[in-house]
Image (cartoon, rainbow, N blue to C red):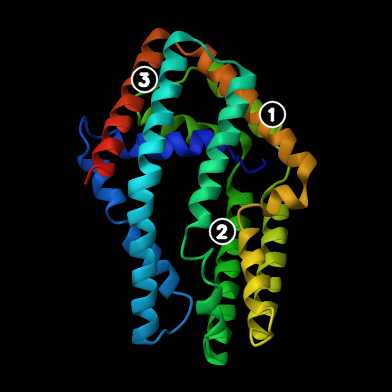
Amino acid sequence: MKKFGMKTLWTIGVMLVLTACSTNSVIISYFYGRMDNRMQDRILEYASFSESQKSEIERSVDAFFLWHRTNEVPRYAEYIAAISNEIESNQFDQTSILEHLKNIRKLSEESFQQSPIAKAAPFLKALTDQQVAEVAMHMKKKDEDFNEWYSERQQSSDDEERVQKIVKNIGRLGIKLNREQADRIKVGLNNYRGGPEERFAVWNKWEEELLDLLRNRLNDDFENRVSLHLAQYQDQMRLHSPENHEHNQINTARLINDLLRSLTLEQKATLLKKLRQTQKSLYTIASR
């Protein structure tokens, strides 16, 4: 079974999970309000930073989330409203869904371009040799953890089990899929190209190139080269396998279209309710 990379369902799904337990903005606001601390903590895991470096990281993260809350959150709310209207009126097809996938990717890329990671070249240049070594060790540990997880998953998972996990997660939103709908998901999973092994290999190559740049960070062209490398972070698979990327986008659009058109009136009503709750929550966040 191959990894299921569906940006539209992931984006909407995360938002729905946050609002599934509430009819107001409390839950999603709670989680969004703590994402800055989560990002900061994850950055701080990479090395032992000085107090001035920690303060710089905190300022960068705070500035990013202020920008994101002010500029991007309203755009997601508007986008969810447009998607809701299309679903309600059945004014969607595989082509329009494919366009949504591309638009959501653009939003994601714009956010990344404003993130502390994308703007980290000057900060990275000032790292000590010890900190670079710690970054390398942290990446190695994360890779080992992934290999262990993937090995266990290969031994314990099968196609049907993974489909049922997806069905169960969707069920937590109040949308109970039938057997035919579950089979559609299984077909979509099987049509996906590029499994975890390939993604992990591409990620390893990106890591190795980054570490090589960090070890030569005193070169005159370091900031420009590392900025270009960081800019490829989200685009690794598309650059590595453009044909597979295009295939997966089309496969995803087809599956989403098939699932949406298979929804019963009750399932559709539940989905629209959750989307509108999410839209309301996002507007509340943006207005803080």
Between 256 and 36, which is closer to the camera in this rendering?
36
In the image, residue 55 lies at what x, y percent? 33, 78
Per the image, the residue denoted by label 2 is 149
Per the image, the residue denoted by label 3 is 272
Instruction: Please say if the residues under marks 2 and 1 sit with CB atoms less than 8 Å apart.
Output: no
**Mark 3 or mark 1, earlier in chain:** 1
In the image, residue 259 lies at what x, y percent? 54, 19
Q: Residue at x 74, y 34 (%)?
A: 247
- Helix, strand or loop at mark 2: helix
**Mark 3 or mark 2, earlier in chain:** 2
**Viewer-nearest of discs 3 and 2:** 3
Q: Residues within 10 Å of mark 1 (few under 14, many from 20)?
A: some
Q: Is residue 35 above or below residue 266?
A: below
Q: Is residue 73 above or below residue 138?
A: above
- Helix, strand or loop at mark 3: helix
Distance between the Cα atoms at labels 3 and 2? 35 Å
Instruction: Please say if the residues under marks 3 and 1 sit with CB atoms less than 8 Å apart.
Output: no
Distance between the Cα atoms at labels 3 and 1? 24 Å
Tell me the quadrant of the picture where the N terminus can be found: top right
Amino acid at pointer 2: Trp
In the image, residue 54 lies at what x, y percent? 36, 79
Which of the numbered marks, if any, corresponds to residue 250?
1
Q: Quadrant of residue 175?
A: top left
Q: Is residue 174 above or below residue 148?
A: above
Amino acid at pointer 3: Leu
